[in-house]
Amino acid sequence: MWAAVLVLTAIFVKTSPQHTRQGSLDACPDQCKCGSDPWYDGVMVSCEGKNLTSIPQQFPLNTTTLYLSYNQLQNLSAGLFDQCAWLEWLNLRNNQLKDLPEDIFRYNTELEWL
């Protein structure tokens, strides 16, 4: 009987969605890579160097680090990062941004680095 329990547990773990300690990686944008963030104990999302002209609309809810550098971003819309309340580190380097909307980071109270 214990063998059956172990086999079922292994199947469940293997087929369950990937999780970090802080959240699911299910909402990772197709053009990005997501994984566990070793510095901020959440989810790290890397969309670097993808020639993006707009930012994906959905990220894992517990995204703490977001790399958007080396793209073709020109504008960021208000409310874009509202869903990322745990965002602590945002890299927008080497894009074509001219200015940011007022209050774009109003819900990002944990943001330490921009």
Image (cartoon, grey):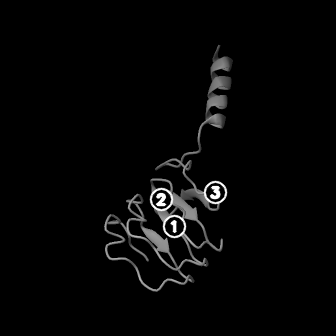
Per the image, label 2 sits on a secondary structure element best described as: strand
Q: Quarter holding the N terminus?
A: top right
Residue where numbered disc 2 is placed: 63
Please tell me which residue lies in front, 13 or 33: 33
Disc nearer the start of the sequence (1/3): 3
Of all residues, the one furthest to the bottom in this rendering is: 98
Q: Nearer the viewer, mark 2 or mark 3?
A: 3
x and y percentages locating residue 58 in the rendered image: 50, 56
Q: Nearer the viewer, mark 1 or mark 3?
A: 3
Residue where numbered disc 1 is placed: 66
Q: Amino acid at mark 3?
A: Asp
Q: Residues within 10 Å of mark 3 (few under 14, many from 20)?
A: few
Per the image, label 3 sits on a secondary structure element best described as: loop
Using the numbered discs, state the Cα–Cα distance from disc 1 to disc 3 in whole angstroms.
Answer: 15 Å
Name above or below for residue 61 compared with residue 88.
Answer: above
Residue where numbered disc 3 is placed: 30
Q: Is residue 45 left or right of residue 62?
A: right
Q: Residues within 10 Å of mark 2 (few under 14, many from 20)?
A: many
Please tell me which residue lies in front, 42 or 71: 71
Q: Quarter holding the C terminus?
A: bottom left
